[in-house]
Amino acid sequence: MVAEETVPHAATTPGTVMIWRQGFEPVMRRADPLEYAILCRSREGVAFATICEDMAAADNAEEAVTRAGTVLGQWLGEGLIIGFS
């Protein structure tokens, strides 16, 4: 017997979807705007410390660094980061 799956409704607001593979399995999830901004800057080659400094200057410093650390931890847990340079 095949289990029934609930098909999610389409998002009503624009957003970013991150898609990657874990082994042979595709994985996807929505990324919030801050995570997307961190991802874009990281792909441009901006150092994570610089991203944190810029976030802290633009917002509550403690909250910004905590949020950036949370994103980094999530990426490590999901296997999205394969190394540091």
Image (cartoon, rainbow, N blue to C red):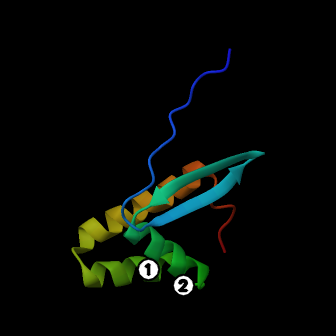
The circle on residue 6 is none
Q: Neighbour class for label 1 at 10 Å: few (<14), some, many (≥20)?
A: some
In the visual, does 2 lie left or right of 62? right
Q: Quadrant of residue 14?
A: bottom left
Image location of residue 63, percent across then percent down: 26, 66
The residue located at (60%, 79%) in the rendering is 43
| Residue reaching furthest to the right | 24
When the figure is inspected, residue 82 is found, relative to residue 6, above or below; the finding is below
Camera-side residue of 32 and 44: 32
Disc 1 marks a residue whose amino acid type is Ile
- Residue placed most toward the observer, 44 or 25: 25
Most distant residue in the left direction: 60
Q: Position of residue 68 (x, y in %)?
A: 40, 66
Disc 1, SS: helix
Picture residue at 55% right of the left edge, 77% below the top: 42
Occupied quadrant, residue 12: bottom left
User: What residue is drawn where x is 36% and y is 64%?
Assistant: 13
Q: Are marks 2 and 1 in contact (CB under 8 Å)?
A: yes
Q: Earlier in the sequence, mark 2 or mark 1?
A: 2
Give the label on residue 46, or none. 2
Residue 51: give its label.
1
Up/down of 49 relative to 18, above or below: below
Depth order, front residue of 79/47: 79
Q: Residues within 10 Å of mark 2 (few under 14, many from 20)?
A: few
Q: Quadrant of the C terminus?
A: bottom right
Please state, as top left, top right, bottom left or bottom right, where the N terminus lies in the image: top right
Q: Position of residue 49 (x, y in %)?
A: 46, 78
Secondary structure, mark 2, is: loop
Q: Amino acid at mark 2?
A: Val
Between the residue at mark 2 and the residue at mark 1, the CA separation in whole angstroms equals 7 Å
Q: Position of residue 53 (x, y in %)?
A: 37, 81
